Image (spheres, rainbow, N blue to C red):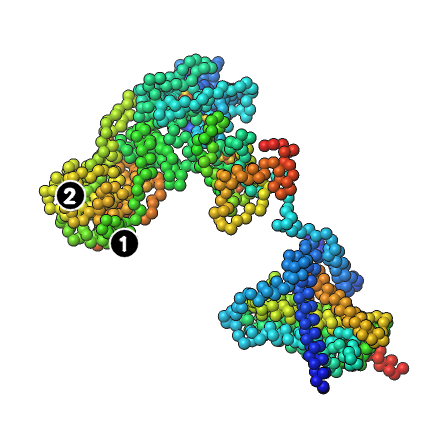
Amino acid sequence: MPLLKIDDKEIQVESGTTILETAIASGIEIPYYCYHPALEVVGSCRMCLVQVEGMSKLQVSCNTFIGEVHPDRKVNGKYDMVVYTQNELVVKERKNILEFLLLNHPLDCPVCDQAGECYLQDYSFKFGNAHSRFEEEKRVRPNEYLGSQIVINHNRCILCSRCVRFTQEISGTSELFVEARGYNSKIAALEDKPLDNLLAGNVADICPVGALLSTDYIHKNRIWNLEQKPSICQDCSVGCNVDVFSQQDQIFRLTARENQDVNGYFMCDIGRYGFHRFEKIERISHPMVRNGKSFNVLDWDEAIKKTADLIEKSKEKTAGIVSPFHTNESNYLLGLLMKETLGYLPPITGEEITFPTKFRISADRSPNLRGVNDICGDLVKDFTSIIKTRDIRGLYILDDGVDRKLDDSWKDILAKMDFVIVQSYAMTELAKSAHIVLPGLAPFEREGTITNDKGRIQWLRPSLATKGDSKPDWEILMLVRNALHKESEYFADLGEVIKKMGDQFPNYSGISLFKIGTQGMALT
Amino acid sequence: MDFLGFIIILVKVLVVFAATMLTVLILIYAERRVSAFMQGRLGPNRVGPKGILQPIADGIKFLMKEEFIPAGVDKPIFILAPAILLIPALMTFAVIPFGSSITILGREIALQVADVNVGILYILALTSIGVYGIVLAGWSSNSKYSLLGGLRSSAQLISYELAMGLAVVSIILLSGSLKLNDIIADQQGYFLSWNVFKQPLAFVIFLVAVYAETNRLPFDLSEAEQELVGGYHTEYSSMKFAMFFMAEYANMITAAALTVTLFFGGWDFPLINETMLGNWGTALSVLAFILKMGFFLFLFIWVRWTFPRFRYDQLMKLGWKVMLPTALFNIFVTAGYLTIKSVV
Amino acid sequence: MAIITKSYEPTFWDRLYFPALIKGLMVTLRYFFKRKVTIQYPDEKYVPPDGYRGLHRLNKYPDGRIRCVACEMCSAACPADCIYIVPGPAPWEGGKERYPVKFDIDLLKCIFCGFCEMACPEEAIELTEIYDFSAYSREDLLIDREGLLEVYELTKNQNYYSRTDKSKKPAT
Ligand code: SF4
Ligand code: SF4
Ligand code: SF4
Ligand code: SF4
């Protein structure tokens, strides 16, 4: 293995890695723009220049490979390559590169949405000149829409071509290209093919500066006001890892979080803009009981007692219905609570989409169908017919807030019931027909584990605070169970539920939130 | 005493009372304005021209305030205490002659409410009663601060009354009478005959003692705000508090009048024989009295806004170790002088 | 280490105290006749010196556009966290593309440190000489964008109190 010396550090590296990769892996800072681990290397930004001993010019570290040299030609008789990232020449060259990049740059950070997470800003601050010697008129171009959701500010673009390579390599749609040459070159979309693929939102994320902007986030907030919390996208059963950016319990944007086992560096636009639908929901924030056509608000103790009483009265004839949108723990506890769980609310389906680099949008657009199948045993997809045939008089439905239209068969079923208990965060049709409504948590508020379609269990973490009186779904179910069976166990936290779940289902055993971590773990 | 005499006395009582109360009002105003001036401020200048109606606004405010009696106080005494303080303060003025006599319809009327032949003793007695007001107020309030204020006040008053009394004794030795009119008569003439020139030491002792007696700075330990919140009147509010206030100012007036009477020839206008000028002379004498008193009242305020407060041990040391021996020495000298004079 | 105690032995003259007392009385008497420093507030108003940090204002361009681009530098710099900004796309053609839809300052929280005006890259927010802006409720002391622009109109040409012309000073 070649021995590399970067500044004062000696590092053993695999033959064929680049200097930049090695530096990133060992925590040495080399600035770069055009390099992206998921994209082909082009070495066009020249930001990552380093000095390599024995080479007359500075080298782009993203495209300089390290290899074994002949023992006679080793530097100091020992090193295969000696790299300087901090010496005078490199520092001066970086200053020059940055000055070039900023020649036509508007420097309008105050209005730029990238400010605060902008590499141009950071590097200029760290490595750049405080002054520009450029005295000519700056080139000014108007903003353009590249697609329906993406705006480009040409003035800020540093022509790193990350966006172009993304459309070529990741989405495979090739909408973007560099138009013209030299001074006139700019990023443009094909005239007949705007940037409207389902991964388009990612270009705003990978653009190192504020040139590509999502219309969804533009001029909305500033990055330092937002709280960044790791979460899991809940819009399909791939379960992309995301970061939720929120301020005062309002989500402003989602971005992809790196997870090589699930989504790589990217996410699709369905999930990216999916959070908006939770902004409009009619939120339930208090336990309620039916009173004729309307509902009365209850406090929790009463609500739990009433629920338990109802179930107690017709224990044998009550069934539970789980949901593929809920966490494993909630579904599991409903199973414990009821004598039997019959089925699950219909999942949402769509078209399966695969991109050239294996990035995938699953046909199953509910996050946890695999978990439901794992945890809840023999469930019937179409449970409505079974209910019709069997003598079931009560239902406990773990509603997921998806606004399903109630068709006639549903209406028949609900009419047949003595009571319907719905646990939900939104006033869906189902909740409106319930006798007791128990307020659970909305998707970005809840915590628990979900299992994606490849059998990877991931930790869904809360990004927002709970609203009103609502409680975590698993806790509600546990309280009802405690009220129903006095001797049943009390779970102090999610971990205990997971443990109990593992005792019952061998492939979920030995799991803990700690082990799942931010990257999830594959089920055995 | 005939009926007319009775009416005359009644009128005199009313006039003196009204004048005292008016002076209290003026003093309250003056105190605020003078203190402000001495501190480079303007003071109250909003109510009425130059703010002269401020005391009336203050009075109205006091009347409107809630009459609050805290739980745990000794109620009868708590209510009585301000009166015990205020009434003697007003009564003292009765024996002080504030002018020579006027002649109306052939009747000669002395400008003095009561010509008591033990006038001095009467005054000393009444000021001592006033102490009860303070002590009782402090004790009945059932509050530490009040009690401390009351105790301080009583100890202070006893200590300084002694020196004050002894200073007065030397005056009595000179005039040979306890009657205030006699003391004034003794000082008639050109103004070197005033006792302040005959008895400068007694004057100084008396003046210092009077400040202590009236609880004014630099001897206001009984109401030292910085240590005792408000002193003996901490728990009082509204009109009862106002009564303490009025008593303090009434005491000041009496003290100023007494100082004038004992040491500055009373209503005597220097170098002029008022009795020869008839009623004009009387007017002149009243004017002289008012002017002299005004000066001492101003001095009260002036001193208050100039000097810091004594520490309690300093106060006691001054009273017992300096003032008392000095007063005794003064009596000794005076008496010796008089004895020698009578023998020679 | 030697302890040096400096003590002053009072002379007999000092011990008499009265000369010192009279000296003191003379000091207060002198002040009695001196010019008074009181400013009779609602009738006369104190005119703060230049650079006084009072009520904020939001500056405008001569054509009426708001200078502020809602970059939230000021609210980030604000140690009292009392500036609340909601940005949005600017309604006018040309010029900066972003402007504050909402711009509230909680004057009760503000400590008038002036960090906001120092942080502002657009010279949009400034502290003016206005100091008397009390109100009867907390809500009234939450000044909004319109209020801040109004303060600009009040103070742009002349000093709010002395009414002297400001135009002679370097314009912002
Ligand atoms: S791209 Fe970066 S440097 Fe350029 S204006 Fe935006 S934040 Fe500033
Ligand atoms: S738009 Fe952004 S990603 Fe694309 S070339 Fe310009 S700077 Fe690079
Ligand atoms: S003056 Fe200081 S405290 Fe007030 S708004 Fe500006 S930065 Fe905040
Ligand atoms: S006032 Fe200045 S600092 Fe504050 S948001 Fe506006 S432009 Fe930015």
Q: Chain of mark 1?
A: A
Given residues B74 and A373, the one toward you in this image is: B74
**Mark 2, residue position:** A413
Describe residue B113's horizontal placement relative to residue A263 as left or right.
right
Q: Residue at x 49, y 41 (%)?
A: C144
**Mark 1, residue position:** A301
Q: Earlier in the sequence, mark 1 or mark 2?
A: 1
Query: Farthest right residue?
Result: B344
Describe residue A196's horizontal placement relative to residue A158 as left or right.
left
**Residue B342 horizontal/vertical position (percent):** 86, 82
Regarding mark 1 in the picture, which secondary structure is present there? helix
**Residue C26 horizontal/vertical position (percent):** 76, 58
Q: Is residue B175 above or below residue A467?
A: below
Given residues A512 and A161, the one toward you in this image is: A161
| Residue A367 visible in the snapshot | yes
Badge 1: residue crowd in 10 Å (few <14, some 14–19, many ≥20): few
| Residue B196 visible in the snapshot | no
**Residue A148 horizontal/vertical position (percent):** 35, 25
Determine the image quadrant of residue A403: top left
Q: Residue at x 37, y 25 (%)?
A: A150
Given residues B281 and A198, the one toward you in this image is: B281
Quadrant housing the C terminus of chain C:
top right
Badge 2: residue crowd in 10 Å (few <14, some 14–19, many ≥20): some
Q: Is mark 2 within 8 Å of ligand 2?
A: no
